[in-house]
Every structure is written in structure tokens, then in C-alpha cells.
Amino acid sequence: MNKKVIIHSLILLTAVTITFFWITDPDLNYYSLQLTAVLLLTLIVTHRILKPVSYKLAESTISTMAVLLISSTSGGISSPLFFLNYILLFELSLLLEPVIPLLLSVMLVVFYLASGNKNTSYFQYLELAAFPLITPLAVFFGKIYQKVQNQKKEIKNLSNKVEELEEELVEEEMEKETI
């Protein structure tokens, strides 16, 4: 793994850990929706302040925390909003490196197992079995997205090069005409 993946993974691990401690504390858990609102407002403000590269990391961290807070507050594994975790995997595969969903998937399974409610049935734990099934798909889409983005950059660079060569050709023709 490269340095960028390690840094992103550590930041996401920190976000998941902070969220875990937040929801396991009964006093703080009461304010989970308010924290989610503050996080989303922070996301809106940082959009104007941060550069696009830094914003992607802030967006991924904030969206991870917000999804975990919302799904944990509304019932954990049995939450009707649990599907947001699957969307989060795809979001992070497109925002960051495609390998990030592999690591996040493991983090989410551990998170939900550690924060499991006493009222959760064994059948509801099958929701966690979907992570290993969805993660390869998210990685695949992330790789395709990265490939398309790289191709767009390459096309733009080649277009600029073609324009430069056309300008040089026109200049050479004008020099020949003046001679």
C-alpha cells in the first residue's frame, strides 16, 4: 500500500473510533443527531475553504461519521437507514483510492459487532454478511472511475500538446512564406 492509502485508512479508522466512543457513551449518544447536523454544516463550510484534494478527505471523513451516527442512532444493524453504509462504500471508492472500501468494510463490521444492541436477532447480523459481497463491487467501480479520470487527464494533456504543435506548425509555415 502506498502512503496515501495508509493516511486515508488511519483517518477513517480514527473517525470510526471516535464515532464508536460517541455512541457508546449514553450522555453523548443523546446528541448524535445534533453532531451529525454540525458535521454536515462543517462539510458545507469546508467546501469553500479547502482545496479539492483536501476537501475529498474531509468529505469522506465527515460522511463516514454522519452515516455511522445516523444508522447507530436509528437502530444500528436493524436500522431502516443501514443501507447508507453500502452507499458509503461506493462513495469512498470514488472519492479516495479504490482499495479504501476493503478496509472500511472490515472497520464497519467490527464497529457494528462491537456496538451491537441487545435486541438484535441473529438474522439481523446477516446484514453484515453483505459487506464482503458488496465491497468487491465498490472496488471494481472505484477502479473504473479512476481509469476514466486518468483517461480524461491524458486526453486533456494530449489536446494541449496538439494545440501547441499546431501553433508551431503555423509559425513555421509563416516563416517559410516570409523567406
Image: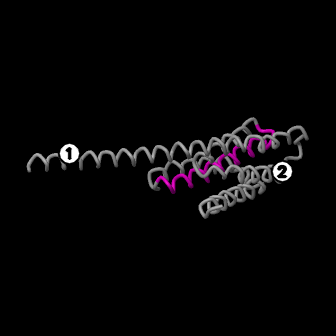
Query: What residue is pinned by disc 2?
Result: 113
Q: Main secondary structure of the magenta part?
A: helix
Quadrant into which the N terminus falls: bottom right
Query: Residue 3's quadrant in the figure?
Result: bottom right
**Label at residue 109:** none
Residue 65 visible in rendering: no
Q: Determine whether the residue tagged by mark 1 lies in a helix, strand or loop.
A: helix
Q: Please tell me whether residue 121 belongs to the stretch shown in magenta.
A: no
Q: Position of residue 28 (x, y in %)?
A: 72, 55
**In this orientation, which residue lies closer to the viewer: 31 or 95?**
95
**Mark 2: amino acid:** Leu
Question: Which residue sits at x=89%, y=46%?
Answer: 118
Q: Residues within 10 Å of mark 2 (few under 14, many from 20)?
A: some
Viewer-closest of 141 and 114? 141
Residue at the spot x=57%, y=50% of the render? 59
Front disc: 1 or 2:
1
Residue 105 picture location, percent across and down: 74, 49
Q: Is residue 71 magenta?
A: yes
- When asked about the image quadrant of residue 22, the answer is bottom right
Magenta stretch, residue numbers: 52-79
The residue shown at (19%, 49%) is 172
**54 left or right of 176 in image:** right
Q: Residue furthest bottom?
A: 3
Q: Earlier in the sequence, mark 1 or mark 2?
A: 2
**Residue that numbered label 1 is attached to:** 170
Q: Position of residue 4 (x, y in %)?
A: 59, 61
Q: Is residue 109 visible?
A: yes
